[in-house]
């Protein structure tokens, strides 16, 4: 019989030292929902974006009772084993709503997460159990290891009270993007929620305790979001091309036969050959036609 794990308020000293604001609770329905609620009621505020500077707030919970993924999917997590964090940043509305570049915000979240995980592994002198145990991104929002899901990402736009809406909206206003990041760090094989999921400790030896891992990864994520988003805000088009090359090296789907499942129930099968300039996926079907995939769940065949 599996013993239920009790939630405890996350202790995040390293993250608190680098973030502009940290909210930590033992349990909530969703850290993204809690962040959005606090931004909306003014209890969580971030200073306006300034050139070369970016504030990052963190909302963390040990247990989520209604964690969410893309397209209405649920994210299952367990206290003391899974990191559930949301990172809130203010960026110009013009960038957040520009469909030619805003897809890269999700890709940035993925790259920040890989950097944070790999940096933590290196810091503690841990080592993969197998030489090909690299972390990759499954477009558009999953962290993969050996073809299994280790983590998920969900980005959502929130309008702060100080910004206008509708006809009052100003393109120069800032909006808030909340990046939710769920990571299976210390789940044993018997606790994995699905056969398609995995956990970092199953692939890497010499890791520190869960609490240390969670804090070290979150610290790096705060710094990574700040550094990468400052560059992206300054030059979205230029950074998009650079990000495209960077994602290519860690894109799990690229070169594989995959099936895209769309929200209307249709599917498209083909080879994932890369990303477009707007971060959408290029899927080449058997007849040699390239298709653009912007919103879908993509699985390997």
Image: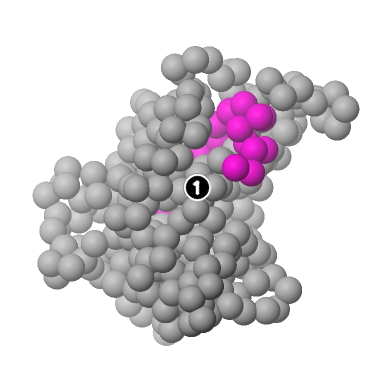
Residue at the image position 36 percent from the left and 80 percent from the top? 190
Task: Give residue 13's position: percent from left, percent from top.
Answer: 35, 33
Residue 90 in magenta stretch:
yes
The answer to whether residue 233 is seen in the rendering is yes
| Span highlighted in magenta in the image | 82-100
Q: Where is residue 79 in the image (x, y as percent from the top left)?
A: 45, 59
Query: Considering only vertical position in the picture, is 171 above or below 99?
Result: above
Residue at 48% x, 82% y is 286
Within the magenta stretch, is there residue 31?
no
Quadrant of the drawing holding the C terminus:
bottom left
Say which residue label 1 marks.
277
The structure residue drawn at horizontal position 41% and vertical position 41%, both measured from the top left corner, is 241
Residue 275 falls left or right of residue 73: left
Q: Badge 1: few (under 14), some or many (20 or more) residues near its Cα, within 10 Å?
A: some
126 vs 168, nearest the viewer:
168
Residue at 58% across, 63% down: 293
Secondary structure beneath dot 1 equals loop
Residue 31 visible within the image: no
Is 12 situated left or right of 174 in this image? left
- Residue placed furthest toward the front: 288
Residue 163: quarter of image: top right
Q: Where in the figure is residue 133, as x and y percent of width and height?
A: 21, 66
Q: List the single residue furthest toward the top.
A: 51
- Residue 283 x %, y %: 50, 69
Depth order, front residue of 93/48: 93
| Vertical position of residue 153 compared to residue 269: above or below | above
Report the number of discs.
1
Looking at the figure, which quarter contains the N terminus?
Answer: bottom left
């Amino acid at each position: 019989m599996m013993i239920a794990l009790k939630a405890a308020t996350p202790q995040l000293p390293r993250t608190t030292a680098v973030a502009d604001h940290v909210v930590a609770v033992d349990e909530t329905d969703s850290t993204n929902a809690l962040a959005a609620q606090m931004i909306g009621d003014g209890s969580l505020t971030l200073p306006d974006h300034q050139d070369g500077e970016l504030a990052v707030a963190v909302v963390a919970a040990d247990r989520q009772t209604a964690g969410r993924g893309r397209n209405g999917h649920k994210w299952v997590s367990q206290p003391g084993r899974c990191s559930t964090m949301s990172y809130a940043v203010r960026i110009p509305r013009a960038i957040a709503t520009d469909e030619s570049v805003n897809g890269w915000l999700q890709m940035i979240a993925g790259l920040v997460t890989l950097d944070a995980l790999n940096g933590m592994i290196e810091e503690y002198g841990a080592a993969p159990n197998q030489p090909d145990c690299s972390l990759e991104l499954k477009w558009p929002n999953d962290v993969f290891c050996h073809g299994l899901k280790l983590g998920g990402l969900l980005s959502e736009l929130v309008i702060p009270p100080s910004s206008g809406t509708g006809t009052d909206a100003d393109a120069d206003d800032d909006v808030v993007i909340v990046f939710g990041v769920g990571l299976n760090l210390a789940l044993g094989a018997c606790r994995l929620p699905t056969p398609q999921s995995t956990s970092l400790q199953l692939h890497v030896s010499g890791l520190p305790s869960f609490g240390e891992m969670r804090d070290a990864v979150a610290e790096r994520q705060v710094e990574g979001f700040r550094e990468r988003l400052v560059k992206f805000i300054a030059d979205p088009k230029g950074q998009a091309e650079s990000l495209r090359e960077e994602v290519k090296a860690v894109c799990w789907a690229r070169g594989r036969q995959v099936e895209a499942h769309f929200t209307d129930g249709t599917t498209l099968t083909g080879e994932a050959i890369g990303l477009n300039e707007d971060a959408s996926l290029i899927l080449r079907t058997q007849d040699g036609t390239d298709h653009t995939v912007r919103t879908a769940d993509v699985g390997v065949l």
